[in-house]
Image (cartoon, rainbow, N blue to C red):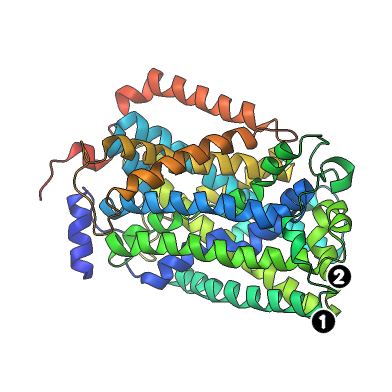
Amino acid sequence: MSLDDDAAQLEKLGYSQELSRGMNAFSNFAMAFSVICILAGGITSLPLGISSVGGASVGFGWPFACFFSVCTAMAMGQIASAFPTAGGLYHWASVLGGRAAGWVTAWLNLVGLITVLAAINVGVFLFVVGALGWQPASWVQPVVVLAIVFSQALLNHRGIRLTSALTDTSGYLIMALTFVLVASLLYFAPSHELGRLFKVENFSGAAGGSVWPSHPNVAYVFLLGLLLPAYTITGFDASANTAEETMGAGLTVPKAMVSAVISSSFFGGLMLAAVVLAMPSVAEGAAQGGAVFFWTLKQVLPNGLRMFLLVGIALCQYLCGLATLTSASRMVYAFARDGGLPGSSVLRQVSQVYLTPVYAIWAVAFFSWAFTLETQVYSTITAVCTIFLYSSYVFPIFLGLLAFRRSWTRMGPWDLGQGFRVVACLAVLANCGLLFIGCQPPNQKTLPITLGFLTLMAFIWFGYERQRFRGPAMLRKPDKS
């Protein structure tokens, strides 16, 4: 498909081509792969798994949860192929379920992306602090995180070509470093006890470094550990959010999205399995709590190799935040373009020099940093962003399931046929389970945050937005095809 064809397809959906469409298939894949970034979420949230049921959180929990993530990506891909626009989730829900559904989905996705960016950048800080064995004063974290997100916004401001070049590099770097990390851990591991990956042990409470409160029910503790894969395999909507900057988006976006999830699931599983196998003892590792990854590397790897890997991983985590900011800013741009946000007339503006939504970029950067000032518990940040993101993924999938072959009859070039019903049902089922897991102690703040958000949204919609908000152009413009 040519650039003119992409622009014509976008015009049918009600929009003109304002952003620079310069991303190829690999760049779109790398964008999602970089946001997922197994070297970020997989490492910083590793204690959530190891301190639940030990190695079984990787051997059993990781593939179990990743299967549902793949189903979610496949269902999203079906819809993305039909409606390849920036801020895709918001448009999908609007077309399939109406203005209110689109408005709620937009806010869920937007809050999810802002909180996941906060979690990533706090994770970068905690990773560097852990690698150095440093215990900084409380004021250091907000200052360093501000510097991180400021630099990410500045790079995004400079244009999609620079950003996609950096995320392309990130994609290669993640794969290369994962290979070196896995090979190094297995080579220097004192033993290779494969049974560790399938041995269920209860490490809640003090036995797991108090990552999770003590609980006698091992099945419940296993479910808590699913936050490790659930948080890691998020952000793949970045492929859809950059659809208007991707060539041949109707086919490229869904293929890139699904490929990114499958690749991350496979390589992430290998990486985490290598960490578990390399531990001198799983019980000792679990007892380290949040320091389990650093402890394992220190116990096993030569110092020079360990420092090389830590520096490379920190860089990948930084680039993960860069790609997440790109995705989130496109969501803000798309929603503001339809008047869905306060200050939409400003947030929708595109730089004539860089062809990027500059005000949207800086707004996302600021609010993601502000969120870290209020929520200091890392596991709570991960739970909030995971719940909001997956809810924004699954809501339009659920609407698509209801509309499939009824009001929604025109599919895109990437079509699962009746298989869409299967993966959509599995995605909805998994999200229900995630809602339960994500609100358990010590993340009990997640429930009031989620309920408070939904209540506030209901008041705003019925009190004001229902009369004002017109929805995306697809609901306002007759079909020209």
Q: Is residue 315 above or below residue 198?
A: below
Label 1 environment density (alpha carbons within 10 Å; few <14, some 14–19, many ≥20): few
Q: Residue at x 87, y 66 (%)?
A: 280
Q: In the depicted view, which residue is nearer to us: 13 or 436?
A: 436
The residue tagged 1 is 304
SS state under label 2? helix
Give coordinates of residue 394: x percent, y percent: 44, 40
Q: Residue at x 52, y 47 (%)?
A: 113
Q: Residue 186: which numbered mark, if any?
A: none
Quadrant showing the N terminus: bottom left
* Residue 446 screen position, x and y as percent: 64, 33
- Image: 276 above or below 443: below
Sooner in the amino-acid sequence: mark 1 or mark 2:
2
Q: Is residue 218 left or right of residue 36?
A: right
Tell me the amino acid under the disc marked 2. Answer: Lys
Above or below — where is 259 with respect to 339? Answer: below
Percent of width and height locating residue 327:
46, 55
Instruction: Say left or right for 95 vs 184.
Output: left
Count of marks placed on residues: 2
Please name the residue that numbered disc 2 is placed on.
298
Spatial CA span between label 1 and label 2: 11 Å
In-front residue for pair 85/80: 80
Of residue 466 and residue 200, the one placed in the foreground of this image is 200
**Residue in the image at 22% along x and 41% along y:** 405
Q: Position of residue 305 (x, y in %)?
A: 78, 80
- The kind of secondary structure element at disc 1 is helix
